[in-house]
Image: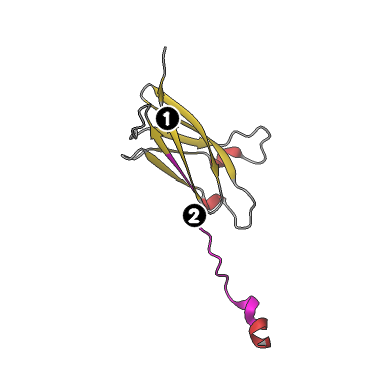
Amino acid sequence: MLAALMCWPLLPSCNKEKPTVARVQIVDEDGYAVPQAYVKLYADPVYPLGDPTRLTQEKLTGSDGWAEFDYSGFYEQGQAGFAVLDIVSFKDTAVGEGIIKIVEEETAEEVVTLVPVTP
């Protein structure tokens, strides 16, 4: 028993990091998915610590209106909290905004509705 306890620290860690992902769906005013809409996630801190642009990612939605952003490389295991990011999206003359709270080792989802811009 004592030998097993002494060898315990030498065993490789089984605590594998899970993906940290943000998924954003873009819909129109009727709730239908909007394919090929531009989506940007970015940090806009009041008091920036470090470089907030490192979290900026941009994509176009797929045919199902979803865009997926992988933040696994930005998260370090043991870190408390991760980020709240702003969302901006547009397609043609419609725009939408929102926010998403990204939680370490989880998949966060948010839906943003595009609204036509009136002149």
Q: Against 56, is 80 above or below? A: below
Q: Which residue is found at the position 56% from the left and 66% from the top?
A: 15
Is 2 one of the magenta-colored residues? no
Judged left or right of residue 92, residue 44 is right
Judged left or right of residue 114, residue 50 is right
Give the SS element for disc 1: strand
Is 15 one of the magenta-colored residues? yes
For residue 113, which numbered disc appears in the image?
1
Q: Position of residue 47 (x, y in %)?
A: 68, 34
How would you rate the neighbour count of disc 1 (Cα within 10 Å): few for under 14, some for 14-19, many for 20 or more? many
Q: Are marks 2 and 1 in contact (CB under 8 Å)?
A: no
Please identify the quadrant where the C terminus is shown.
top left
Look at the image and give the residue range highlighted in magenta.
7-24
Q: Which residue is found at the position 66% from the left and 32% from the top?
A: 46
The amino acid sitting under disc 1 is Thr
Judged left or right of residue 57, residue 116 is left
Q: Position of residue 52 (x, y in %)?
A: 60, 38
Q: In the rendered structure, which disc, 2 or 1, sits on the residue that comes first in sequence?
A: 2
Q: Farthest residue toward the left?
A: 63
The amino acid sitting under disc 2 is Pro
| Distance (Cα) linking label 2 and label 1 | 26 Å
Q: Position of residue 19 (x, y in %)?
A: 49, 54
Give the SS element for disc 2: loop
Q: Which residue carries the number 2 mark?
A: 19
Q: Farthest residue toward the front?
A: 30
